[in-house]
Amino acid sequence: MILVFVHELGHFLAARFFGMRVDKFSVGFPPRIVGKKIGETEYVVGATPLGGYVKIAGMVDESMDTDFAESEPQPWEFRSKPVWQRIIVITAGVVFNFILAAVILAGLRFSNGDVFVPAENIQGIHVREGSVFHDLGLRTGDQIVAVNGNPLERFEDIFTQAIAPNGFVLNIDRDGEHIDIREPDGFLGRVTEELRNSDDPNALGLSYITSVLGGVLPNGPAARAGLERGDRIVAIDGRSIRYFAEMRELIMASEGRSLTVNFVRPDSMDGAAGVEVVSTGDGLTEYRTTLTPEQIQTAGGEFFGIGVHDADAEIIEREFGIVRRDLNLGEAAVAGVRETWRYGSLVVTSLYRVISGRDSVRQTMGGPIEIGRQTGRALQQGLGEFWRIVAFLSITLGIVNILPVPALDGGHLVFLLYEGITRREPSLRVRVAMQNIGMFVLLAFMAFMVINDILRL
């Protein structure tokens, strides 16, 4: 409803600016819930929150009202205005969607700054066996140095640069050997399904967080075994450990069996009482302790398994050197525009991949139910993530609306461009016929997406 309101507000303000009469401003489609007429315009909230419309006098739109065609054009009608003014009115909704996204993203940048882990500082990753990236060919210890030959600045750039028109190529360093891994058909669809069906932040099985403990539950299993925040787990039952996800997998697979845990602690920290010293040197002491089946089974709460959680921001900064940049209002605005452009490029690329047949419509696209699910998940992660997905959806709405499909803004734009080039307006009969076809196609596609969403629940 936010996005529809902003989109229609763009049409409304542009129409009023050029002296066009706006008969109705509706957010949501019929049946009508509430409405009030102020001046020449009736403002309505509809019960079907799948869109909205602005009814401008003298325009063929969703209402299919063509009664105006029987009279001479009036100065306040859409049809009486120059083509360039009508083009601005038609595209204003899309422009407002992009402006909204840029404002949201700039606001997030201004409040949070620019914070990221440099990709070059991540010397290796953990890849869960059986995950989508494991099946792709990545292995634990690999370093991703580039995507499609473009060096990575941030680790998360992997997921955006990988959405390429003709597929991606991951450039890997594996034990000093250069390896290229090419995207197979259907990969992005599988990634989308994994993310859609899981609340696990590591659903794709890709992580770089080391095995340093970010917290230990007081009186929990790990604490009773002598572990503390800042300890680095180096081995479990003699198996070398480098990543927190790797440690978690071993512990979860133990099924109550006793585990021998080796961990390293700086000599500057208090020693571990009641545990065995394995070795000392280089300012570090390695210890060995045992977790009993009872200790493992009594874990609970927000801490995973044995009563520990992964590295917090302080430890991640110490391990990888987080870059933090505070942005002033101007810098945040520029960053918001750049991010809007980047998200827009991703949407266009994704649509191209679907149209070209590289990706499946059913797997990679979602309707209103899926939008609701993903927005709800984002809100659970905080207001920042909620507004980020609102910005992304606003960009998506803008791009979809400008597609050259009758009944969409892009369809109207095609007619106006034709008129501007040929100096001849398309016949009313053609425009109404195309509008009807466009509405039928859109409704059929919407029904397909809703059914597809339901089948995936």
Image: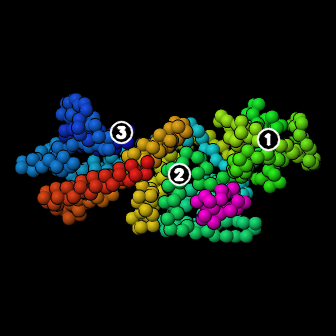
Numbered marks: total:
3
Region of the chain picked out in magenta, as a range: 126-144
| Mark 2 or 1, nearer chain start | 2
Instruction: Tell me how far mark 2 sits from mark 1, CA to CA.
Output: 35 Å
Instruction: Tell me how far mark 2 sits from mark 3, CA to CA.
Output: 25 Å
- Label 2: which residue? 195
Residue toward you, 363 or 296: 296
Res 429 label = none
Q: Secondary structure at mark 3?
A: loop
Q: Mark 1 and mark 3 in contact (Cβ < 8 Å)?
A: no
Mark 2 is on which residue type?
Answer: Leu
Residue toward you, 28 or 285: 285
Res 1 label = 3
- Where residue 13 sits: x, y (%)? 29, 40
- At label 3, counting other C-alpha atoms closer than 10 Å, the crowd grade (few under 14, some 14-19, many 20 or more) is few
| Mark 3 or 1, nearer chain start | 3
- At label 1, counting other C-alpha atoms closer than 10 Å, the crowd grade (few under 14, some 14-19, many 20 or more) is some
Q: Is residue 331 rendered to the left or right of residue 262?
A: left
Q: Secondary structure at mark 1?
A: loop
Q: Is residue 172 rendered to the left or right of residue 226?
A: left
Quadrant (top left, top right, bottom left, bottom right) of the N terminus = top left
Magenta highlight on residue 264: no
Q: Is residue 235 rendered to the left or right of residue 434?
A: right
Residue toward you, 112 or 176: 176
- Label 1: which residue? 292
Residue at horizontal 39 percent and vertical 49 percent from the top: 454
- Where residue 159 sits: x, y (%)? 56, 56
Residue at horizontal 28 percent and vertical 37 percent from the top: 47
- Where residue 307 sits: x, y (%)? 72, 37
Residue at horizontal 83 percent and vertical 37 percent from the top: 226
Instruction: Tell me how far mark 3 sits from mark 1, CA to CA.
Output: 54 Å
Q: Secondary structure at mark 2?
A: helix
